[in-house]
Amino acid sequence: MDIEQAVEILSSTEEKEVPEVGVRERLLEACEELKRLLTGLLDSKGRVADEVHAIRKLCKSLRGGFSLLGMPEAGREIQAVGRMLSAIRDATSRRKTWDRLGWKDEGVAALAILHLLEQQTHSVARRPPPEAVDWAHSQVDLAIGMVEGRDGEEIAAGLDDGLKALDKAVRKRCRKMRRRGEEDFHEARKALKAYLGARAYLSGGVGEADPVRGDLAELLGDENDLATLSIWLRARGFTAKLVPELWKELGKARRKLQNRAIRASRKIVGK
């Protein structure tokens, strides 16, 4: 289903209140689920990294839903929760990205990097204090209050325009990737995440999976992981001047992903 069909469904539904109320209810249910997951961080059972990953994934989805309703202020409250837990997820992601890169070195550089990554992964994998979880709950409650303060007519007025705006942003950012600027790939990924997150809260079939945009988001996620790993390496002295072969491998891996992303984006914006 393309964007025009999706908007047509939302515009032509005779009982318009059903899908619009459904969007609000689904967002509120997701907020309550986020609070439940946050409370779970205080439980000693389970793996912290997996729990944090689930929380941050839900935060991204919620931000897409708030973008759909034109509520960036609510999205910022949720973004703050994700950022509070970023250290744990970022360390885990860097470790996995390093494994995927698969760079080997006859010297000691690769071994040093591996053990530094492992050390950071273990050192940050601790549950946040109860006070931090309480603060996160308060941020989610603020977002809930904003949603509850919107009536059905306000939501109805914003759905069509919200979906169109998110799709327009995806297309715009996908075209700009062809310039191959580092920020262009990053911004395209953000636009895709917002669009895909928004779709999850729509009814009438609009919320079904979008494999084209979903696959592109995954490619750009892998590219972004290499970008953040590069920043981490440079900050710790593993520069291109000192470890040139590593940076050649990083550059080659990123270019490969960027080329694949640009090709995949043609299914969205055409040639």
Image (cartoon, helix red, strand yellow):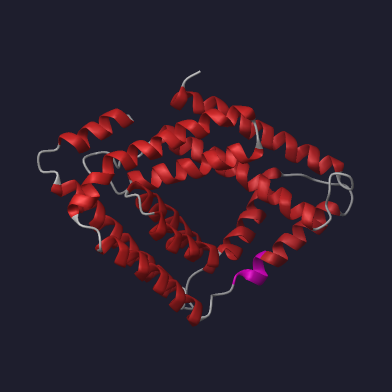
Asked if one can make out residue 218 in the rendered structure from this viewpoint, the answer is no
Q: Residue at x 87, y 54 (%)?
A: 108
Q: Eyeballing the image, is 220 above or below 271?
A: below
Q: Is residue 107 left or right of residue 52?
A: right
Q: Is residue 25 left or right of residue 214?
A: left
Instruction: From the top left corner, tell me how far across and down residue 230 is, in percent.
Output: 73, 48
User: Does 122 appear in magenta?
Assistant: yes
Instruction: Point out the residue furthest to the left here.
Output: 14
Residue closest to the eye, 244 or 109:
244
Q: What quarter of the picture does the N terminus occupy?
A: top left
Q: Is residue 49 left or right of residue 194?
A: right
Q: Residue at x 62, y 47 (%)?
A: 225
Instruction: Point out the residue furthest to the top here.
Output: 271
Instruction: From the top left corner, tell me how far across and down residue 178 is, in percent.
Output: 60, 27
User: Does 119 appear in magenta?
Assistant: no
Instruction: From the top left corner, tell me how far across and down residue 94 is, in percent.
Output: 66, 54
Q: Which residues are magenta?
A: 121-125
Q: Residue at x 32, y 60 (%)?
A: 30
Q: Eyeballing the image, is 26 above or below 145?
A: above
Instruction: From the top left corner, tell me how far across and down residue 203 is, in percent.
Output: 23, 44
Q: What's the magenta bit mostly, secondary-structure-wise?
A: helix
